[in-house]
Amino acid sequence: MKTHVLRPLILAIVLVSCHLLFRHFYVPDDFGVNGKNFTFGFYRAGSIDDWKAIPVKYKGKELCAECHEEQYESNMASKHSIIQCENCHGPAMDHAETEEPLTIDKSRGLCLRCHAALPYPGSQRSELPAIDPEEHNVGMECAECHNPHKPSLEDM
């Protein structure tokens, strides 16, 4: 073979060899032991214990119901029953043990995530009432007129 073909071939072989050698020493032995597919197998088996050691931040609506039964029942009877309490009240983390108050997000932006009317056809969600944030009570928080646990004005 001529050198102009041989040199790139040797360079490619050296690069692949360096990559494989680096991978052999750098990748942990427990990596990919759960299968060799791209969906589930490419993680380190030891990381399972690492992930289990991270405290759970969001506990779910059922935990809230244990102490806040009246608010829970009110919420479950409203159109907001599909929304987790922690979406507005923040992550519960160890709230049940310490009873520290949670920070409530009363910002207008939180409500507008779902209730802002979008300016293009077909964007209106089927059952959510939408408002134009530029016209509807500009400068006011939604909770000044609406009780998030009973969102319709009739239930105030």
Image (cartoon, helix red, strand yellow):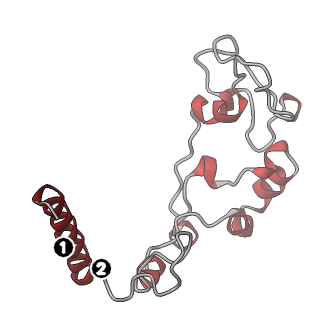
Residue carrying label 2 = 27
Label of residue 7 in the image: none
Q: Are marks 2 and 1 in contact (CB under 8 Å)?
A: no
Which of marks 1 and 2 precedes in the sequence? 1
Quarter of the image holding residue 21? bottom left
**Picture quarter with the N terminus:** bottom left
In the image, taking residue 90 as reference, residue 114 lies left or right, namely right
Q: Nearer the viewer, residue 10 or 97?
A: 10
Say if 5 sits above or below 30 in the image: above
Identify residue type, mark 1.
Cys
Q: Quadrant of residue 115?
A: top right
Q: Secondary structure at mark 1?
A: helix
Q: Is residue 49 above or below residue 109?
A: below
Q: Position of residue 17 (x, y in %)?
A: 21, 75
Query: Vertical placement of 95 versus 116: above or below?
Result: below
Q: Which mark is residue 18?
A: 1
Residue 27, given in percent of the width and then of the height, sits at 30, 79
Q: Position of residue 114 (x, y in %)?
A: 70, 35
Amino acid type assigned to the residue bearing label 2 in the image: Val
Q: What is the quadrant of the C terminus in the image?
A: top right
Q: Position of residue 139 (x, y in %)?
A: 58, 17
Extreme residue toward the top, this view? 135
Q: Name the one closer to the observer, 106 or 58.
A: 58
User: What is the crowding at mark 2: few (fewer than 14 residues within 10 Å), some, or many (at least 20)?
Assistant: few
**Residue situated in front as seen by the camera: 138 or 43:** 43
Helix, strand, or loop for circle 2?
loop
